[in-house]
Each structure stands twice: as C-alpha cells, then as structure tokens.
Amino acid sequence: MFGKLNEVKVLRDPIHEYIHIEYQVIWDCLNSPEFQRLRRIHQLGATHQVYHAAEHSRFSHSLGVYEIVRRMVNEVEGLKEALSEEEQIEVMLAGMLHDIGHGPFSHSFESVLDFNHETMGALILMGESTIHDVLVSHHPDLPKNIVDILQHKHSNPILNQVVSGQLDADRMDYLLRDAYFTGTSYGTFDLERVLRTLRLHDDKLVVKESGVHTIEDYIMARYHMYWQVYYHPVSRSFETILVRFFKRLVVLNAVDPGISKRFAMFGPFFHEGYPTLKEHFELDEAACLYAFTLARKESDEILKDLGTRLMDRRLFEYAEVESPQQIAAQRQNVIDAGLDPEYYFALDMAVQRPYSPYQEKENSLIWILNTKNEIKELSQASVLVGAIVRGENKKDEKMYFPRETAK
Amino acid sequence: MFGKLNEVKVLRDPIHEYIHIEYQVIWDCLNSPEFQRLRRIHQLGATHQVYHAAEHSRFSHSLGVYEIVRRMVNEVEGLKEALSEEEQIEVMLAGMLHDIGHGPFSHSFESVLDFNHETMGALILMGESTIHDVLVSHHPDLPKNIVDILQHKHSNPILNQVVSGQLDADRMDYLLRDAYFTGTSYGTFDLERVLRTLRLHDDKLVVKESGVHTIEDYIMARYHMYWQVYYHPVSRSFETILVRFFKRLVVLNAVDPGISKRFAMFGPFFHEGYPTLKEHFELDEAACLYAFTLARKESDEILKDLGTRLMDRRLFEYAEVESPQQIAAQRQNVIDAGLDPEYYFALDMAVQRPYSPYQEKENSLIWILNTKNEIKELSQASVLVGAIVRGENKKDEKMYFPRETAK
Amino acid sequence: MFGKLNEVKVLRDPIHEYIHIEYQVIWDCLNSPEFQRLRRIHQLGATHQVYHAAEHSRFSHSLGVYEIVRRMVNEVEGLKEALSEEEQIEVMLAGMLHDIGHGPFSHSFESVLDFNHETMGALILMGESTIHDVLVSHHPDLPKNIVDILQHKHSNPILNQVVSGQLDADRMDYLLRDAYFTGTSYGTFDLERVLRTLRLHDDKLVVKESGVHTIEDYIMARYHMYWQVYYHPVSRSFETILVRFFKRLVVLNAVDPGISKRFAMFGPFFHEGYPTLKEHFELDEAACLYAFTLARKESDEILKDLGTRLMDRRLFEYAEVESPQQIAAQRQNVIDAGLDPEYYFALDMAVQRPYSPYQEKENSLIWILNTKNEIKELSQASVLVGAIVRGENKKDEKMYFPRETAK
Amino acid sequence: MFGKLNEVKVLRDPIHEYIHIEYQVIWDCLNSPEFQRLRRIHQLGATHQVYHAAEHSRFSHSLGVYEIVRRMVNEVEGLKEALSEEEQIEVMLAGMLHDIGHGPFSHSFESVLDFNHETMGALILMGESTIHDVLVSHHPDLPKNIVDILQHKHSNPILNQVVSGQLDADRMDYLLRDAYFTGTSYGTFDLERVLRTLRLHDDKLVVKESGVHTIEDYIMARYHMYWQVYYHPVSRSFETILVRFFKRLVVLNAVDPGISKRFAMFGPFFHEGYPTLKEHFELDEAACLYAFTLARKESDEILKDLGTRLMDRRLFEYAEVESPQQIAAQRQNVIDAGLDPEYYFALDMAVQRPYSPYQEKENSLIWILNTKNEIKELSQASVLVGAIVRGENKKDEKMYFPRETAK
C-alpha cells in the first residue's frame, strides 16, 4: 500500500552508521522545507558554548530517532507482527517529526512567549505546510495519526510508548548523539542490547530481566548527561541572557514602533496569540543570530549589550547560592554598578532525579519482565534504581550576574 | 615573559580529548569577538548537505589545530628546545588563528569576489580588531610574526612548516575531525605515532624512517577524504547554486538600487575593492542564511528560486561528463525548459593526486630520515607513495542542472 | 640515581595507546622470566568461556597498571613533587608487579590449597628470583619497599593508596581493559578526567568536587562489570569444576602414588606447606591445560571426566536457588544419576555492593575535596552513591550440576 | 530442513558486537572438542611478543569469519536468493571451520614437518572426529561440501569466493580483529560499506563502482598490517628460534630414544608421515609451551637454551641485510662465540605487494561493476591500485643472531 523506493536510501550517520530509508513517504517528508529547516537549529541550543563540538542539529537527531524507531519496529521481538504497515509508518514518521515544532533556543522562547513546541508541531502537521501535503498525498489519516502518537492518544497504545516514555527512541538517540558530539563518554549505553531485550507483553513494551543491567546503565547515562551537559551552568548563563534579550524586545516594542520592523524575524514577540506557521518557519537559528548582529547597532543600551554578549560570548558569571543575604548582596552589587537587575541578575534552580516512577504516567514507566512472565516496574526490579528512587533529589541553585559586578 | 593562567584551562574535544590552554594570550584571543565568530561558520561549508552530521564549525577546528601545534611544540623531540618562548606562542597562535579570515562558504565567495581568506586574515591581525589589540597588549611583534608564519616567511624557517605544509597541524586536525563528524572512517590515521616519529633535522621537520607507514596511511586518508567527502558531487551542487546566487545579486545591483539595502549583509558584493573589516566580521553564515530567507520574498524569479533551493535543499542534479555532444544536449534542455543556462547549467571538474612532490615548494614536502641520518623526499622513501606519484591523476568531471530539465 | 634508557621505550596498547618506559630498572623487570610468565596466565581465568574475546593476560594488565601509576605520578597535581625519585620508581614497580604472585585460575587454587597470591608475590620479590636480583642490582631496598607498598605499610602513606584502594591503578586498568576485551561498554569511565581531578590533600589522594560525577560513573562501571562479567554464572560453572578437579587430585594422591609423577606440574597439591618458587614459576596456565589433556587418559573416571569437561567446555548447568527443597531435589537427581555430589553438585553465592564505606579501611575510601578545601567520604558527597550505600545488597545464589541430571 | 534453535544465540564480540547463531548444526559444531581446541591457539602465533595485547585466539577469529559469512549471505544483494538453504549453511560452516586444521605456530611447524593445515582440516572434517559426526548427523553431504568450498571446488562457484579470495570473510575478519587487539588503527576499513556494495554478477561476487574507495582502503589496510604487524621482525625472531627448536628435536631423536617419551606431545616429529588426528588434536599451544618448560631441564644445551629463550623471551637480535660480507661477518661472530650457526644464525626475507592480479587465480581477483553493468578487475578500475600494482615490490631482508654475538 505504501510505496517503496527503488533502492533503500542510506545516509551515513556517526551514531547508527547508516540511516535506512525504504518508504517514499519518509523520503518525501525528509525533503520537505519544514524538515530541512531543522538543519538550522542546534539540537542543544546553547550547549556548544561549553562543549564546543556539540554543534549538531535537530535535523541529525530527528533522523536518529527515526532510525531507532525503524529498528525497534523491525528488531524488537513481536513488534512488527503487532502493527499494521500503516501503523509502522506512522510511528516511524512520529519519530522523525517529533521535533518539527521546535524553534531556535526553544526553552528560552517558551519561557517568554505563549508557545509550546509540541502544540506548534501539531499545527504544522495538521495545517498549511508542505509536510502536511506530503503526508496526505500518501494517506489522508497520516497527519492526525502522527499527532495522536506524539500526544500519547493513538488508538493503538503500543505506538504511544515508542517515541516518548522513559525508554524511548527520542531519549536513546539524544543520549548517544549528545555524548558523541560533546566528546564525553557519559551518555553511552548499549543500544544493541536494549533492542535485543525489549519485548511486547500485553501491549506494553517491556524489558526482559536479563537486560536490567543495560537499563540501569541507561538510567545512569541520563543522570550523568543531565548534570554534566544539559544543566551545565554556562549554557544556563547563555539562556539567562537570551530570555532577557527577548523580554527587552517586548518592553521596547511598547515604546518604539520601529523595532518590530528592524527585528521582523521576531514577529511573534510583537503580537498577541500564537506565532503563525510562516513566522515559525522563517524564525530559525540563523535569523535569531542575525538579529543579535543587528542589535549591535541599536541605540537601546540594554538590547545592544545583551545581543553583543550573546554573539561575543561575554556570558554572566555564576555562583552557588548559599544564603538570602548573599543573594541580596550580589543583587545590590548589580544595582551599584548602575545596571538594572531585571536584566542583569538571575536565580536559577536545577533539580533532577535519575528516574521518577511516582511522577510518571503509567505508560511512561519502564517495566521489567521476569522469567516467570511477570512484570515489575523498574525501581522494584532493580536494587540500584530502587536505592536511587528512594534517595534524596540532587539540586543545584545558582545566581547569574555580570563578572564585573562580582566583589 | 608571557603570562600563564592560574590553572590550565581544558576544553573537552572529541578528537583530542582535551584542548589545553596555558597562556593568557591564547585565552584572550579565544575570547575575542573575531574568534568567537568562527562558531558561526561551518568547517565544511555545504558538506553537511550530504553527510548530515558534519555540522562542526571552524571554531572547533581552529582549537584542534592549536592543540596539535601545542603538542608538536611540546612532544616533537628537539622542537621545544629549538624555539624561544615567544616563537612557541607565535606558532600556537598561528595554528589557532590560521582561519580567522574565512567567511561563510569561502570558496564560493572567492570565486565571485576579489577576496582571499588568507589576505583577509592578515588584515584582521594587523588592523583594527579586538584580536589585534589583544595580541599587541601581550607583545607588540605578535601580529606581524603570526602573519609571517601564515605566509611562510617567518625568520625562523621551522615555524613555517608547522601550521601549513604537506604534513601540518591544519590538515592533521581536519582529516581526523571531518572523519569523526561525517561518521566515515576514511580520515583516520595515527596522530600519536606521527608526533612520536617527527624530528628536527637541520631546521627541517622530518619523519623517522620507522614512521613511514604511518605517513603512507595519512596520505591515503587524505586521498580518501577528498574523493569521499570534500569533492562529493552534492556539495559541489550546492556550491554551484551558491555561486550563481551571488552572481545574480551583482547583476541585479546594477539595475535595482534597493537590493543593496535589502541585502545589507552582502555589502562586499555592492562595491569595488576589498570587504571592510566590519563587513567581513558581520557576514557570518547566519547572515548568509537569513539572506536566503529574505530572497524567498524577492520579485526577481532567479534570485528567489536560487535562494529557496539553497534553503530547502532542492539542489541541482548531476551527471558524469561523457562527450561534448552530451554537454550541449543537456545545456539545450535547460534552455528548452525556459531557464537561463548562466544560472541553471554548470560544468565542474575535480582533480586530485594524493601527494604531489613536483608541485610543492620544498619546505612543504614530507621528508623521511633514515637510520644513517640521511633524508629523502617521501615519494623516494616510500614504494607506495612513489607508485602513486608516478601513476596518472584521478579526475571527475560533472555537469549540473535542475532535475526537471533532465530527459 | 636511577639509570634511564637511551630512548623512552613505548609498547603499543589498546587501552593506553602506548605504555611508556623510561627507567632501566622497569625495563629489566619487564624482561625477567617471572614477569614474562604472566603472558601465560589469562587475566580473567575462565571468563573467556563466556566472553570469548576476553583472552588477555595478566602481562597486559600489569603493563597497564604500571602505565596508570606512571601517569598518576606525572600528572596528578602535586604528586610528583611529594615523592622522591626512588619512591616514584617503587610505586611504578609496585603497580607493574602487583600480580607477580598469581598462578593460573588463582581463585580456584586458593580455595583448595593453602596459598595466597599476595604472599607468594612477596616471596618472589624477596626470594631467589631473577626479578629480585634485578631489583637489588638497582637498589638494595627496592624489593622490601615494593612489598611494603603492596601490603599497605610503606612509610610514605601516599604510596599505599596508588596501587590498591577503592580508586586505584589496578582497578582502573582492569575495568577499562576487561570492558575492551569482552566487547562490552560497561567498564568504561573517563580515566583522563579522573587523573585531572585527583589531588593530594594532607597525604591523602582525594578527588576534586568537580570530578564527583566521573567517580560515580566509575563506581557504576565496577558494579556493572561485576554482575555482567566477573560473576557470570558460566565462569562460575567452569571454576566449580576446576575446584573439584583439584580436590580429586588430592584425594587420588592418597591412594595412587603415580599420580604425583604423571601430574608433576601440580606438585603443590602433593605436599604440605607452601609451593616452592620453582613450582610456582613452572605452574602456568599452559601447564594446567596440558594436565587436563593428560587427564583424558587417566583411569579414574571422575578425574578424567572433569578434565575433559574443562577442555571441551562441557560445563555444568545452573539454576537460580529458590528453596531448600529444590536444592535437595537436584542433589538427589545427581545421586540418582550415579554421580558423586561431592564432585557433581555445587552451591554458589555472589554478593556485591558497588562501594562499601563501612567495610573498608580508611585509606581505601574515596575522598572528595570541595571548593572550601574540606574532604568528605564519597557516599557523603554523592547523592547517588549515598543512595546505593544505604540500599540493600544485590545477591545471586545458584546451584550447579551436569545438564543430564536436570529433570 | 535444517533445524533452528529455539532462540537465536548471540555471543558478544568486540568486532561484530554480536555473533548470531540460528541453526542447530552451527551451534553443535561450535561445541565440538575440535572447535573448542581453537581457544588454545593464538590467532597470531608469536605476534603478542611484540604487540602484547594481540592475545586473541583462532576460536574468536573463526567465530568472526562465520559472522561475516552469515552477514554476506543475508545482506549482500541477491546472494541469499542465489543459494539453497543447504548451500547457505555449508558456506557459513566453511567460514567457521576454515582454520580447524591449524596447530600452534602453524607456519613454523609447516616449515619443519610435512604438514599443511588445509590438508589437516580436510582430514578432520572427513575423518574420525566429533565434528565429522555432528555434520553427518545433520546432513551426510556436509563434510564433503564444506571441504570442497575450502578447496575452491564446490559445484556452485559462488561459494568458493566467499570464504577465501582477495576480498573474503577470512581476511576481512582478521584485518579488523588483529587491528583491534594489537591496538593499531591500520587494519580498519569500512566493513558495512563493503557489504553494502557487494553484488552478484554472473555468479561472480563483484563490488559496485561506488564502493571502489572502500576497497582501496581495504587494500591499504592489508598492506599496512603486513608491514606493521604480520612481518614484524620480533615475531620473525621468535619463529626463527621455534623452527630451530623443532629441528633440534628431530636431530636429537636420532640419538636419544628417550626424547620422544619426554616430549610425547611432539609425536609428529618422531615418525614418518602425517600427524594422526589424535596427535594433532592434543598438540595445542598449551602442550607446546609446556614442552618448553620441560626443555629447561634437558641436558642438551641447544634444546634447553632455545626452549628457555622462547619462554623467557630472550629473542634473537636482528639487522638489515646489507651485503654478503656483512652476512658472512656476523655468521663468523656466531661461530666465534662458540655457537652452531645452524641454530644461532638465520636469514629471512619478507616481500609483499598490496594486491597482485597477475599471481592470483581469476576467481580470487576483485572485480568492480560499473554503472553500465560491465566488470573490470580492480587494478584496472582503480587509479590507486593500478599505480601500486605497476610499482616495485617492497622487500625486507634481515639476519637474526643472539644479541651477545653482535659486535
């Protein structure tokens, strides 16, 4: 029913050796402008400000997620048989397109704008876009069904676990990929063995007991990547400035009508409601960075300074938070230096637990299947994960400020 | 004399594990806006259009070259002793800054504009730039001496061989790095052993005979990277369109005065003579890509189409050149399709020989030192390289055109 | 004082790239018959019966430990300055020679014989051996001081922590090496970063707080290697048979005086007291395996069968222990099959905790140094390790028996 | 027709991640004593005397060859369809069993004895052996057909190219494996891409033109491994002594009847004609090494000295051959030192060309298939290989002698 390419296309990839594409619809989506746009958004936002080699894009990651889903469909015992061909294609496309709604530095955007990359993704897939047309040309239900998978409400519950959960194709690709490109060894785990020990059990994706160590290793990989990479204070410093740059744009817009012309790429900041598809499409990371170049010439000192800091990597200094007195003192330093603490002072807290069974929906949990064909939730089946779940959370609270205001 | 940092700074790097920075002047250059700008230029221009993961920047590569020079200075037997501290720092800086004059897609730019990234690099180092000020603040002779190394005319002939030659820090880093990020194994060679077998012999960098196999391997790595990666026809297709986009801009400028405003980032295309330092500084890859986004809205059909093709990766098809008749026929197809062959048809030839002793200046050759303390040029010392040098050149000639014009 | 080689010798090694040897005394020890003998003993005893590629020897591992000690001495901040040249050499030699007392399948031997590889190592270093003569020829105190380090009683307390402890050169090499040769990724951790974050603090080797994640990763690597590799039930099955083969030899010796001639290589089983140095030297793994070949021709059915099983890898089956009834039933099955349960039935329990601060001597603990220059024991400093330490132990109890006796 | 296992068995392997076993007959052969014996023979004989970590066995390599054949059968386009299930199994078994006739240090044995490991392999497969019985129990023709493949005379010419040729599973595994275990990068090439570009064309295994660079890389890998690893003079030194130890045994046997008892494991040296299957089976590397231990106690000074040299790695020194005078002088030095040059002096020449189309049988050549569906022999299709084929051979001639006789 779904057309195949004359020859399987293979794309060289450092994580999976090759990405294999067999179906025409996958190939057509890959070649849509919306998907190609992901080449222009870094997977890790500001992280390459710390790990300079982590310059990979959401495009590469999306191909990687697709490939893991494709392998799961083909290699996880019993999975292929449990899915119709249409469902197989839907879940592979869901893997490939799960990040299609992202913009540059999404998390910073989302903290300023009323915007959510998942909602935007659904709008793109269901709305006026090349990718929507491509999907519909192959089957009218594809957009809806892909969105359903991404929103965990597809009628076949198996599909909802493949792309996102606690042991999903998205996380598995990004851990491996981010570890490779940062050059750290932390994110490494044994993907081959995960694939070999996954099983289908009463419509649940479960892991055979013999794979429990591999899963423990995967949980630890996540834990380490969070603290060593994703929560690194230098990235958080960059994002702190970014958020303040956006806030300043909004503030200025109320007083300077020219700004929305000079920074046309930031349209969504200048009107109520959701970004349009066109605005979203054109606002890639290149547009964002070019805007900071333009900010170098603005007369507003704050906008100019923040934009220049982002371009030239003059980031804020940071310090561990120790007491309210210390916070107040540093905030006062900023004021004494003649700077507005709205823009030049920030507090930020990171908290993470490696795996949290109590906070997850049931179908996101990791289940272990023992040799007697019973399943247990991971923290029950693993002494190691159990100990961690019952331990206290690790926290990291920091304050950020310009270096020259430290005393 | 040259200040050291309180603690050696280390930057995680997937190729060298860590980049080690010991001197304040190196650190200050790294933090200059001109050097940070290299984060916004892909090392391999259009190559990530084929090898999607090859998204690394000239920033990462420049750090890598610096690190190899640093290791050569410290690890190549006899080298450190042969250099003054100032010379050591000069050559490390030359490694780090050798690409400072690059713009986005440099080779395409250079084929349209009167522009050369090496000349531009010298202008930056000698002219009004933060990096110039930083260098001078540490020692007034640094800019001049670094430029001399990059132009092979430093008074100490040893320095001229370290950063560029046939076995230099630049090539060694990019082969390893490009192999890593493309995910191919071709560029791999044994850097450790190269460093171990390099020697100084009468002011020449030479390789001990026991290292000749390692050098053969390195020569083959280069050869394979050229054909598998650097000359890949898909990158050449992208560049073909890019060059024609730039040419179109120049043509339009003669008739449409508004274009130089709407595409202000392309200032150098709109005036005689060299780009200014400011123009060059602001024209990074982000600016370039944002310009293509702007081109989507232009009324000129050619500019609009070419820009859109670059953004959405609708590249030209290609075919092996077989005969003048075949070329003429395809050119006619383009015309028949109502397209201007100036913009929609191109011929391109790639030629490469792995190592060419006859075309190189003497101090770029690779010399082998035997156990009797005599030196021989590599193609004399290696049966393998000798055979290749005497063999015929490999060539690849292709024509490029829009897919829809093929018959 | 200690002679250096004309040129640093380098030995290619997959884990450390190169092993570097600078001192004559190290080189001479490496070339002693006692050290060369370690080539004939597998590092992991029976593990290559499961992980077929884990065929590396104690020789390779010993070189690796030496190399890590050498790097610690040279790279850990402050360490080199805190040690005299003699102490540096002593600790490097202690690393290299720490396994010199091992025999083939040591743990099985030690469970039958009154024998301990550490005691034997001291006897070799202090007694009539080439290695003793080599050491003394360089400095009369070397043997004694090396033994003191291996027994944790050297007068300089720093040295006692380098070779053995919870974060020592021995473990660091074997985790990396065993992971590499088994082909698993479990034992991987970031050795470079461990070396970079180790410090000397009041004669204690401590880890800077910024390295705590690396240490957590190392603790997990150990945990996984234990369960996935070292405690693998197939190795334990091989060892179960091996121990019974040795016991049978001892039993037969009481009734068959010829056996001590036919199995002359097993001399230590046939007399009271400790093996002599000569017996120990000649009893390598080749001798042991040749003995099993000889056993194929013995008239005693048990000796013959057990030896043949070891050679042909007809190992015992295993099952998880569930109840006393199940144990008794399987034992009865063995008897019913006409087999002596002394030789054909075994129980075996493995218990491990990743890191056990309560069971260790203080100078074996891992200490973390925070930015205020205070030290904390690892399980206090790491939320993750703390959780694990307070969690319950993981256990694995199995019974072993011939496959044909299972019902 | 051929029984499958209930569950695919997977063996962890550092080169192929996993070895996959699906058929009962493969599993049964793997568990035969003759195949298990390969664990006791190093893949690279004496090479671990130089590259200490190259301690892998013929067992591991044989599994690797099997796995590559299995992948070829399943992944090379068109191959599976061209073979019956029986032929598929035959060729996988031929890959797995191609080294079954090897003894320890085979090449040295073969230079003294009238013995050839390929002939011996055929005798084992066709004669009284467990492996013969296993094969026959699955299909009476298996032994004959496997031997036919190994001798290039199977009725289906495709099969004869898979296991041995210029681009065969045997070489592909050993290059990758030997590179991994020596720790060098030389043997690396892109196995994935070789498998992807192999095709069947008129019963010939050919490589698509797009894979020609990968094959060039493979040819270079072979070339480098030969000179850096396989022909390393230290291994050749070990083998030189080994051959002379064997010759001495033969000489002594003529005068000392007790020697054939004391060295019973060397039975084949003491009688005319071929080794028996039993002699061959029992003569593994452990037996050989134990014999050298026994030689330490012999009264014959030459046998004792040579055996001790092998055990303690007191190898012969070597020097490049320069002139007949130099050879004669060194030979005289040996005589002057009171040593017999028959045993203490040797000349040895190594010659290699990376790929030799003129010396190979047609079905061993490598063929390249171009886009017009024509095939060309590799040296015609590759400018690089063509240059090398027409270049001169590389040679290395050395003489070997005890260090103490050098002047």
Image: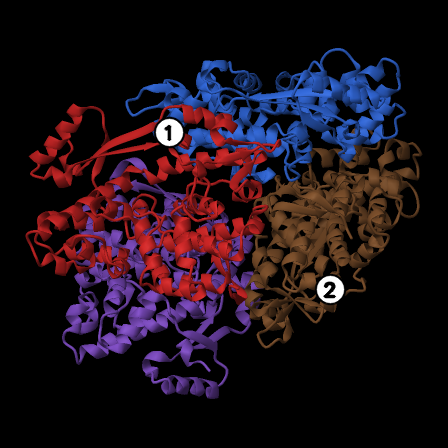
Chain colours: A red, B purple, C blue, D brown
Tell me the CA gap for discs 2 and 1. 62 Å
Amino acid carrying label 2: it is Ile
Q: Position of residue D248 (x, y in %)?
A: 84, 40
Q: What residue appears at the point 84 percent right and 16 percent down from the top-left corner?
A: C253
Q: Which residue is denoted by mark 2 in the rendering?
A: D158
Q: Is residue C381 above or below residue D198?
A: above
Q: Which residue occupies the foreground of this view, C290 or B344?
A: B344
Q: Position of residue D321 (x, y in %)?
A: 67, 54
Q: Is residue D210 above or below residue C299?
A: below
Q: Secondary structure at mark 2?
A: loop
Q: Which residue is denoted by mark 1 in the rendering?
A: C77
Q: Which residue occupies the foreground of this view, B33 or B97?
A: B33
Report the chain holding disc 1: C
- Tell me the crowding category of disc 1: few under 14, some 14 to 19, or many 20 or more residues within 10 angstroms, Cα based: some
Q: What residue appears at the point 37 percent right and 29 percent down from the top-left corner?
A: C77
Q: Which residue occupies the foreground of this view, A373 or A236?
A: A373
Amino acid carrying label 1: it is Glu
The N terminus of chain B is located in which quarter? top left
In this rendering, would C280 be left or right of C209? right
Q: Does the rendering let one see residue D29?
A: yes
Q: Secondary structure at mark 1?
A: loop
Q: Is residue B322 above or below residue D72?
A: below
Q: Position of residue C1 (x, y in %)?
A: 48, 26
